[in-house]
């Protein structure tokens, strides 16, 4: 209960923060709405006055006394009979004021809601850039997209429509009750006796339907996540022939969403049906009571028109209150989901946030790391990478190779030990400064759905084209790009699906080279290219990199053998290190892999010779 209350306070605080600078629009919208309500209530009074005072000559008038005094000075009833168009003009003016005020109400409230929605989207996007890398590995992309779009739009709609409608309903209730009870208490009671029933049923309905809104919203999020995963992983789906399984999965999620939403719609239908019936009963009772009072007492026809009109004007907004409250519940859920993102701690600077030159030896001193504090992925890793040298890393799947270089970029923080660059602990280096100076290419690089030129220039769009061509030549991809119909202006599909695996890796290498970073990391990033291209890239890199310290993760001995130091990882431990020649003299994983690859290479050469 306490947690729920705290969440509500957080939500209200979030709304207030996002509405900063737009509150004047809300106040102006509320004022315009009040004017519109008053103008809408004036119209029935004008009609009543025309029927009773001008046409009926009963002497009855519901207009304020100061208005009647003004009319008498202008000539009274005789003047209005001769100029009946003045009554019509007054009705037109009140209707025009209502329309104009309604227009400004919508305009001001829309300004407030759109500004708030923009601030929410900006805040979410900025916050998602600042949360730790680990956060993105544990959340569904589809769910995040829904929170940043659908949930924000739910809150926007509530502020632009439902919130002001609640105020409008309350103002209408107060104004109408004041007018009706001042005219005739008995008739007022007959015209409003169902309003408490509608109000109570609205709140009961709100409590009941809110949980169903949550279930429907969660089911929609799950459906969005399934769709997003399928579309982004379409190549894997096709490669393994999993279309039928994916269709079945989507169908199941779609059915779950349909069932929960259908249940929600049945609850809506039940509420609307019941409240419709109560509303029509109220109008019927009001009309019958008004007719009875008009026949048996001095209750006039004009007054009957006022009461029946006001009853209709009141019944439907009060009935609508249940839906508004339900939407409020849905908006509250959406706001809570948004707040979950915004309240997640951003990536902290644990140290002094220094920005020293990134140069010098890189030292790992007794480094331990685990995604789970009870299960270390890396255990007591110690080595030194001399400035300007190449360090190669070999190990089986799950041995901790990628985790090692992710620690170097401080995507994760080691749980024990320390990493130093030029004698400075990387925890004391500002993470943005650190990452700008470490270029990394992953095994599955991400390319944007833009041109190849834009992808390579992502670091700095103002880079000269010639520098891009040079980087592409080093990555052995320039000639490949030039062979495309549109060359460097070729549009890369989402995640680079229009390129082969090797082409993607080489474009990513060219992009990384544009950083001119003093530390380069190749995380199995040449696995999709052939050995000749691999050798050509390494040779070009050797000529270009100058004093850069390079880390290469690979399973190819031909790629690793030229490194100044080779690290061999097994089960998270550094079991061997040394040069290619040194490791071949030791019994261990490196020697076994080298022997297997040499044997396979020999067999392949023999097969080629026989084929020739």
Image (tube, grey):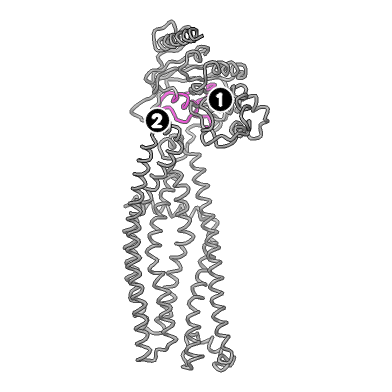
Q: Earlier in the sequence, mark 1 or mark 2?
A: 2
Residue that mark 2 sits on? 240
User: Mark 2 falls on what kind of element?
Assistant: loop
Left or right of 578? Residue 538 is right
- Which image quadrant for residue 77? bottom right
Residue that mark 1 sits on? 506
Residue 266 appears in the rendering: yes
Q: Position of residue 129 (x, y in %)?
A: 50, 39
Q: Is residue 394 above or below residue 516?
A: above
Q: Position of residue 150 (x, y in %)?
A: 45, 50
Q: Nearer the viewer, mark 1 or mark 2?
A: 2
**Residue 213 - label:** none
User: Mark 1 falls on what kind of element?
Assistant: helix
Q: Position of residue 599 (x, y in %)?
A: 43, 8
Q: Spatial distance from mark 1 to mark 2, Cα to Cα?
A: 26 Å
Residue at position x 55%, y 23% in the image: 519
Q: Position of residue 277 (x, y in %)?
A: 33, 71
């Amino acid at each position: 209960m306490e947690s729920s209350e705290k969440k509500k306070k957080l939500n209200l605080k979030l709304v207030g923060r996002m509405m900063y600078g737009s509150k004047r629009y809300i106040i102006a919208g509320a004022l315009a709405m009040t004017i519109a309500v008053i103008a809408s209530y004036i119209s029935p009074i004008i009609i009543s006055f025309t029927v009773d005072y001008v046409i009926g000559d009963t002497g009855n008038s519901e207009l304020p006394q100061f208005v009647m005094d003004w009319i008498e000075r202008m000539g009274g009833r005789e003047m209005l009979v001769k100029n009946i168009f003045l009554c019509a003009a007054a009705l037109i003016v009140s209707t025009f004021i209502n329309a104009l005020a309604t227009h400004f109400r919508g305009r001001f409230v829309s300004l407030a809601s759109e500004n708030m929605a923009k601030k929410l989207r900006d805040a979410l996007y900025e916050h998602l850039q600042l949360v730790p890398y680990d956060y993105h590995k544990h959340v569904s992309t589809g769910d995040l997209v829904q929170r940043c779009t659908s949930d924000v739009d739910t809150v926007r709609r509530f502020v632009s429509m439902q919130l002001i409608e609640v105020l409008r309903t309350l103002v209408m209730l107060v104004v109408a009750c004041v007018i009706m009870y001042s005219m005739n208490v008995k008739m007022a009671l007959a015209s409003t006796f169902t309003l408490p029933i509608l109000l109570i049923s609205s709140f009961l309905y709100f409590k009941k339907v809110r949980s169903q809104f949550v279930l429907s919203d969660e089911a929609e999020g799950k459906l969005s996540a399934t769709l997003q995963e399928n579309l982004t992983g379409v190549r894997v789906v096709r490669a393994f022939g999993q279309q039928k399984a994916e269709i079945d999965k989507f169908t199941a999620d779609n059915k779950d969403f349909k069932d929960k939403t259908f249940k929600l719609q049945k609850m809506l239908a039940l509420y609307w049906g019941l409240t419709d019936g109560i509303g029509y009963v109220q109008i019927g009772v009001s009309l019958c009571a008004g007719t009875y009072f008009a026949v048996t007492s001095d209750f006039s026809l004009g007054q009957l028109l006022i009461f029946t009109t006001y009853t209709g004007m009141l019944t439907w907004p009060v009935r609508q209150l249940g839906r508004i409250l339900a939407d409020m519940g849905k908006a509250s859920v959406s706001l809570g989901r948004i707040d979950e993102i915004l309240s997640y701690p951003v990536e902290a600077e644990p140290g002094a946030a220094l920005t020293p030159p990134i140069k010098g030896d890189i030292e790992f001193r007794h480094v331990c790391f685990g995604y789970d504090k009870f299960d270390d992925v890396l255990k007591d890793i110690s080595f030194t990478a001399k400035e300007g040298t190449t360090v190669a890393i070999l190990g089986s799947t799950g041995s901790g190779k990628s985790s090692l270089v992710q620690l170097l970029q401080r995507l994760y923080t080691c749980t024990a030990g320390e990493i130093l660059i030029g004698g400075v602990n990387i925890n004391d280096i500002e993470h943005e400064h650190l990452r700008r100076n470490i270029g990394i290419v992953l095994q599955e690089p991400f390319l944007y759905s833009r041109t190849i030129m834009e992808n390579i220039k992502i670091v700095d769009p103002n880079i000269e084209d010639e520098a891009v061509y040079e980087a592409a030549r080093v990555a052995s991809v320039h000639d490949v790009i030039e062979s495309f119909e549109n060359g460097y202006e070729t549009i890369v599909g989402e995640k680079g699906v229009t390129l082969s695996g090797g082409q993607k890796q080489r474009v990513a290498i060219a992009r990384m080279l544009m950083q001119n970073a003093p530390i380069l990391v190749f995380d199995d990033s040449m696995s999709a290219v052939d050995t000749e291209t691999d050798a050509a890239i390494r040779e070009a890199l050797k000529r270009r990199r100058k004093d850069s310290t390079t880390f290469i993760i690979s399973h190819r001995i031909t790629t690793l053998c030229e490194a100044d130091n080779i690290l061999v990882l097994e089960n998270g431990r550094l079991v061997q290190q040394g040069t290619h020649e040194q490791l071949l003299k030791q019994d261990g994983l490196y020697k076994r892999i080298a022997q297997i690859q040499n044997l396979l290479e020999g067999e392949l050469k023999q097969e080629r010779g026989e084929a020739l």
